[in-house]
Image (cartoon, coloured by chain):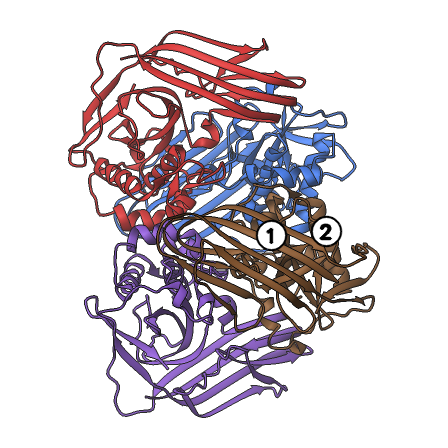
Chain colours: A red, B purple, C brown, D blue
């Protein structure tokens, strides 16, 4: 499936600082970046690199003086690929069978304090034996109980807050989903991407749960089809997967994002409560 | 209903300090303290007084030196009285109709952050129109989901924690009940007392909700009959109604509590999920 | 000292609701309300009353339907009186000597979790023997370390957060001051009022500490002279002393506040770090 | 420097479960494990592996039934090596110059919410220009203000709590040090090891800060010489570097740890407040 993605981030540097941006589409064996461009205005030299585990492509640049308007623009055409698997017979994850690269996604993290949600997760979802159904059910519970409300949370809000405060944006929905999965001993990680048919257009965050050897995508917001994503990054949570990290006296100003279909047909795919088909980006 | 109550608290004073104890049975127009005794060993002069709003009878004393074993003993025979009312037709509390003495029990307090539980309370219990049934249902939810587990919480644990951590002791059950009520605009207050048939014997905490002009008792722990209480105090939460406040280098050592029936018959009374009879201590 | 105070609060009622406003000047034996007016536009019937402990004069009214613009206006001329006392020889508060009406102001409350600040308060201020100097020093520490920053906090922010996050508005400064005092076994309470020479004009919050039998005013923000206040209320913290409590679907829109001198002369009074003169409103 | 290390952990399995232990000495190019043994009693098959980034050597095993006493024993002789560098002329870390493998250690993590400590860290330590001195000073501040108190914290306590509560054990001291460093844009990571001359013997936790291209060891507890460590693991915080992770109904029972010198001489090395010599394990 081909998509044209575009993002432009605007900043004002009041003094020297460094920005690290996380907006490049991943280039994996099944997500091909057919073409891409990234540029800064005014011209600033930048450094593009990947993190060791290969799940992020970052751009980093310094500003050394006052610059009222810096814009960072990325555009790409990406051809990606996903598979749909049937999890009707999914079985519980055995910790002892997990690959060592998956194991860290059972740990609590900055925004996903799974250690505090253990009893709650087991009280609410512990009786469900099929782990796909567990994640589907907890995703449904989040969707039903947490209100999508711009501005209701901030960069310090964590899953522990969202359980009770029950309002948030996509990152809060994702954090709560991840925390509940980990509390149920299901490895889970944060997923950010460009999302087709997201209105208003924006970067989107959701999560992946590790089920029967696959990282299966879930989105508690229900805002977009699950097959319309271009993957930017996966990580523990927004602490290591934010769109931008700013060091120094630089302020975020503006953002423009788009994700358009570059293919002829698109059949939106959503999960249904009694179906066990899960989507995995490759 | 007559009860004989007894409590003995043991302390070690390492240096000078002050203790304020909250273990006397209230003496109200319908709870008569027939006889009572309070003494300190070794002999220390103390001051017994009531707080302005008349909902606590406190004892206060200084220790001025190292004393390895201080024991404070209270025993009393109390005749109290409660009424059982039918709340089948209970209607929503109108803030504008509340007496000014009741209004403060709508505010969040140290351990009952009702301001943070607003959405959750409404999502879970907002659809129930009879407020007695609302409180009964939320009490049932707490009872079902929070595990009674000695040592699982400490003096800093609040309702906001308990919503998610789902373990605690009687004070945590009470705090969560109060916070949920207040979030639903139902005035609620902390209630401490001696409780008949509590095993192991201890002071007990539960809560009162203000419904149709009455303070109705609820106990999310379900550990004791609701008609076996001798009221010690009511207040906002454990911050103003703890059994003891210690100032200075004095350590709590030991506690002994009992509450025995001094009457011939006792018919345990518990709420049932589909019955609308509520108990009010007078 | 005479002041003319004025406030106008604007609301939109989307549906039925109740408002409780806390904007009337207190009428005490030394703060005389010479004249005052309160009115609602459009005309709505209201109820004006005092809380039992006499530290707030509240106004309460219902709205029963959609009203796009409700304005509540209060204006008054107030003659108040304060004394300045020398606390050079102030001595530590003995809990056992406190009047029972003062004792509750040692308890932690919703926004002032003094129980969690015990070690910190003692580490930082425990070595100071004069309690006036303790409060002056802790007020100075707050002033130096917490940044006054509109919009940096919200209605859930408490003293525990502010210790570390070090930004806030007047209520956050007051909460932290109160929490530190209580942790040092100094009774402390929230104080709201109209403040002369506050720019931009607004309601103001600061706090009182109980020293040598007097409630002494402190203001960690340092924004206004300490002798330019007209007292509206005192209480445990913003949970029981907010300017307005809203029940139902009513939104706050706008606010206008003023406090003008109605006397001929005004000598601004601020504390100095090495002077032990404290101000008490009567 | 050669050390003999030993640890024995005891568990009771009430039902099936999985344990992941993190007690093996790291085997790096400068820390040689000369000999080692690990065994389980009763015999249980286990799997020993490294995490992808090579900073932990884990052991994992299943228990499939009730076993009243499981003991896991590790003993090794390790020859390690450290260097002492002079940081008198250390200069500020530039984010843009950091290797991509170091960058993640600037992110907040489960127990090190550096995002919430930004203002505090800058208010207290921002004026110090030499980053080695910054870390030394903040370590000294922690040592002076946080009380080492067994049992004062639990597995949910984070740096944000410790700032204010000012009591904890080694992991809490480490978390606070890490969080303050990251808030100052100094990469920092958790370090666990066997520690010579720690009384009572136990696993120890401290932290490393990334200064002038080196990971420099700091220990806010001041309990042990800095040159007496055998490194077990580094990580983001205790969430990914705990001694043991337990999945299922298995209870920790007992622990025995020792770390003895296997060399002829040992000169204890501690930092001094005005010296700029820092230790790095290789």
> Does residue B117 sit above or below D277 in this rendering?
below
Please tell me which residue lies in front, C201 or B154: C201
Crowding at mark 1 (Cα within 10 Å: few <14, some 14-19, many 20+): many
> Does residue C278 sit above or below A142 in this rendering?
below
**Position of B86 compared to B185: left or right?**
left
Name the quadrant containing residue C235: bottom right
Marks 2 & 1 on one chain: yes
Q: Where in the figure is residue B170, as x and y percent of width and height?
A: 39, 67
**Position of C28 compared to B35: left or right?**
right
Mark before the other along the chain sequence, 2 or 1: 1
Quadrant position of the C terminus of chain C in the picture: bottom right
Q: Residue placed at 30% from the left, 22% from the top?
A: A197
Q: Which secondary structure, mark 2?
A: loop
For label 1, the residue is: C171
Q: Where in the figure is residue C151, as x and y percent of width and height?
A: 56, 41
Q: Residue placed at 47% from the left, 34% from the top?
A: D36
> Does residue C114 sit above or below D236 in this rendering?
below
User: Which mark is on residue B192?
Assistant: none
Quadrant position of the N terminus of chain C in the picture: bottom right
Q: Where in the figure is residue C224, as x and y percent of width and height?
A: 72, 51
Please tell me which residue lies in front, C255 or B270: C255
Asked if the residue under mark 1 is in contact with the one under mark 2, i.e. CB atoms within 8 Å, the reply is no
Q: Residue D265: tell me if it is visible.
A: no
**Position of A197 compared to A150: left or right?**
left
Q: Which secondary structure, mark 1?
A: helix
Q: Chain of mark 2?
A: C
What whole-number distance in Å separates the C-alpha atoms at marks 2 and 1?
Answer: 14 Å
Q: Where in the figure is residue B63, as x and y percent of width and height?
A: 65, 79
For label 2, the residue is: C224
Please tell me which residue lies in front, D119 or D234: D119
């Amino acid at each position: 499936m081909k998509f044209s993605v575009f993002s432009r981030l605007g900043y004002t540097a009041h003094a020297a600082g460094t920005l690290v941006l996380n907006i490049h589409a991943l280039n994996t064996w099944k997500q091909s970046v057919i073409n891409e461009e990234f540029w800064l205005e005014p011209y600033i030299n930048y450094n593009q690199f990947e993190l060791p585990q290969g799940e992020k492509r970052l751009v980093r640049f310094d500003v050394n003086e006052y610059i009222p308007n810096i814009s960072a623009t990325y555009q790409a055409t990406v051809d990606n690929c996903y598979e749909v698997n049937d999890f009707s017979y999914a079985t519980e994850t055995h910790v002892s069978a997990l690959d060592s690269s998956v194991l860290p996604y059972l740990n609590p993290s900055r925004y996903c304090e799974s250690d505090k949600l253990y009893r709650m997760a087991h009280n609410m979802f512990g009786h469900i034996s099929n782990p796909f159904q567990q994640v589907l059910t907890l995703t449904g519970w989040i969707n039903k109980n947490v209100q999508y409300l711009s501005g209701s949370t901030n960069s310090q809000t964590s899953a522990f807050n969202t359980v009770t405060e029950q309002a948030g944006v996509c990152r809060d929905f994702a954090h709560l989903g991840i925390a509940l999965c980990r509390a149920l001993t299901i490895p889970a990680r944060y997923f950010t991407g460009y999302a087709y048919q997201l209105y208003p257009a924006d970067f989107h965050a959701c999560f992946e749960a590790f089920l029967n050897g696959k990282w299966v995508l879930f989105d508690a917001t229900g805002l977009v089809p699950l097959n319309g994503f271009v993957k930017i990054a996966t990580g523990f949570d927004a602490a290591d997967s934010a769109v931008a990290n700013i060091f120094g006296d630089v302020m975020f100003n503006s953002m423009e994002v788009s994700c358009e279909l570059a293919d002829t047909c698109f059949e939106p795919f959503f999960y249904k409560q009694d179906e066990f088909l899960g989507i995995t980006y490759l």
